[in-house]
Image (cartoon, coloured by chain):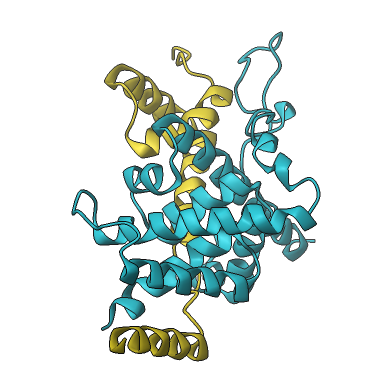
Chain colours: A yellow, B cyan
Amino acid sequence: MSVPELTCEELVEVVTDYLEGGMPAERRLLFEEHLAFCEGCQTYLEQMRETIRLTGTLMEDDLEPSARDALLGVLRDWKRR
Amino acid sequence: MTLVDRHGPSMLRLARVYVRDRAVAEEVVQEAWLGVLRGIDRFEGRSSLRTWLLRIVANLARTRAVREAHSVPFSALAGAEDEEEGPSLPPDRFRGPDERWAGHWAVPPEPWNRPEDELLSGETLALIAAAIDALPERQRRVITLRDVEGCSAAEVCNVLELSETNQRVLLHRARTKVRQALDDYLTGSQDRDRP
């Protein structure tokens, strides 16, 4: 088995480039080749994806009802002017 | 659904990444809506309505944050702290240059293997929120808009006035730290489970 040309240490630095889809095709191939052989990097990439998914479920920081009503009140008053 | 209901939460969240005080952030949002009504910045349809609104909030919140910063020493350095960061993971996680398989994992990450309801528990989410809160300002802004708010990369560049590369670097650093916080928590508690 040949050693892939991208090291794990390099891979963790470019994992966002990969996920953002901003990698040139050649580099992307190298990344995916490395991934196919490396369980540690598969785990790392999977955890990055999990991190993004879980961050996306953070509670909606809704306007508190009182603030919302105050805001709508201000906007209504403004329209009347 | 009113415009306030649809865009209010995003506007408030963005305001709060500049000014942490909730009441002040709410004032910024209010100011933004009034600005919209006064036509401070005409909507010309070059971007989505949401991007346009968020830009107005970002500009107002930035001004407000600068004004408030006089009472908070060192906040002027907030941008500088991003620049001097080391590698994503400590070098001892990888094999040294003289070793066989140099640059490959010495200590590979352990799979989390946690059930979904535990991952989505209040405790885990509070941990993520705390990790985001602890990030340097610019990283916090980018990850909040991208991963919490679900904005596209182009939108974030537009709203925060960042280059594409800058946006990606800040996002990378932010996500790396949040992953690390999760990993410390999830694999740390795994060890406690297995004495």
Whether residue A60 is visible, yes or no, is: no
Residue B32, image x, y percentages? 42, 67
The quadrant the N terminus of chain B occupies is: bottom left
The residue lying toward the viewer, choosing from A57 and A10, is A57
Figure quadrant of residue A73:
bottom left
Residue drawn 48% across and 33% down?
B166
Residue drawn 39% across and 67% down?
B35
Whether residue B99 is visible, yes or no, is: yes
Q: How many marks?
A: 0
The residue lying toward the viewer, choosing from B47 and A4, is B47
Query: Is A9 above or below relative to A67?
Result: above
Residue B111, image x, y percentages? 56, 49
Residue drawn 50% across and 60% down?
A55
The residue lying toward the viewer, choosing from B32 and B40, is B40
Query: Is B186 above or below relative to B76?
Result: below
Q: Can you name the residue that lies furthest to the top here?
A: B98
Residue drawn 47% across and 89% down?
A70
